Amino acid sequence: MCESSKLKKVLNFDKTPLANSYIKSTKVKEKFYPLSCILCSDCKHLQLQHLVNPSIMFEDYMYVSGTSPVLKKHFENYFKRIKKTIKLNKNTDNILDIACNDGTFLEFFKKDKFKKVIGIEPAKNLKHLNKKKKIDINTAFFNYKNSFKFKKKYKEFKIITANNVFAHVPDLRDFALGVKNILSNKGLFIFEVSYLVDVLKKLTFDTIYHEHMSYHSLKPLIKFFYSMNLEVVDFDLIEAQGGSIRVFVSHKGSYKVKKNKIMRQIKIEKKQGLFTKQKYLNFYKRIKNQKEKIKKLINKNLNKKKTNCWLWCPC
């Protein structure tokens, strides 16, 4: 994130296959990829050590947002939060959702009569779902280079969202500079990601897989955006995805920063040892203990049928 070379491995799992990538035949040999996490000694950001080509994971994507009633309700509340936060003109303000999936979130803007609702989505197989909803969809990966094409086509955006996407980006700086390039002076970039505090506290190790290249906490994000003349002005802690953080980012000086709220949360991150290697060693031990507990529980029940259980866990 900060381009430092001071990186230390803090989690090392077994090689695993890709999530959401299903083999079509038992004759096909499934590929396994390294899965380990490194912590930056300078900015304290946690990320994967080995990255898989995003084209392999995202151009033909199995997950569809609109199939989840819970996620639909979450997006509805998210939409209402945005409307309370910033004054928007339904006729003139451009709304952009990066990696919009099937357009479920953007659909709330369409239903509320917003005229300029735009999506970017790399998955070619999801394009027809956006067309059905009459959303202006661009099939592409978003990056700094592409941002100039979107700026030429749409000018600037008052709202840019990236929901459960900012963890999927291989080059965060390139992505953020692209956002900065097309964000209007009084615009907001709002994104949601799994919150590292919750991942560690709730033992949601299933969120650590190849699609999630970064594991975000507030302190590294503030330093990261500040280095590009952007700033985190607010955040929400939300229940989505087992515990997530919704971050509000603007051009520096465009909005009042909720400093006290932000500083309180950073103190919580530090108090929980989020930026220490020992925190992750303990996390790994808890995963292994949980694995053994589940194996014992399952085998206890299966033994009645005189059979055995094999349980996969990435440790």
Image (spheres, rainbow, N blue to C red):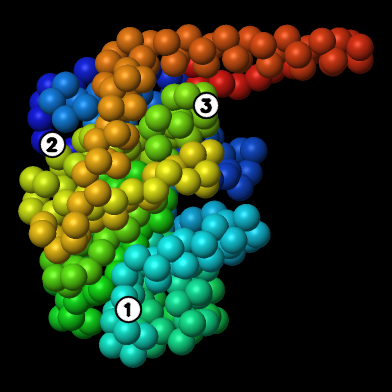
Q: Residues within 10 Å of mark 1 (few under 14, many from 20)?
A: some
At 47% from the left and 24% from the top, the residue drawn is 201
User: Badge 3 is on which residue?
Assistant: 202
Residue on which disc 1 sits? 88
Q: Which of 312 and 152 lies nearest the eye of the viewer?
A: 152
SS at mark 1?
loop
Disc with the residue nearer the chain's start (2 vs 3): 2
Q: Would you name the residue on which mark 2 appears?
A: 2
47 over 184 or under it: above or below: above
Q: CA distance from mark 2 to mark 3?
A: 27 Å
**Three-letter residue code for mark 2:** Cys
Which residue corresponds to the image point at 13% horizontal and 25% vertical from the top-left?
Answer: 42
Decide: few, some or many residues near mark 2? Use Cα within 10 Å; few <14, some 14-19, many ≥20: some
Foreground disc of the pair 1, 3: 1
Cβ–Cβ below 8 Å for labels 1 and 2?
no
Estimate the spatial distance between the alpha carbons at disc 1 and disc 2, rounded to whole Å. 33 Å
Which of the 4 image quadrants contains residue 252? bottom left
Mark pair 1, 3: CA separation: 37 Å
Report helix, strand or loop for mark 2: loop
Quarter in which the N terminus is drawn? top left
Q: Give the residue type that dot 1 points to.
A: Leu
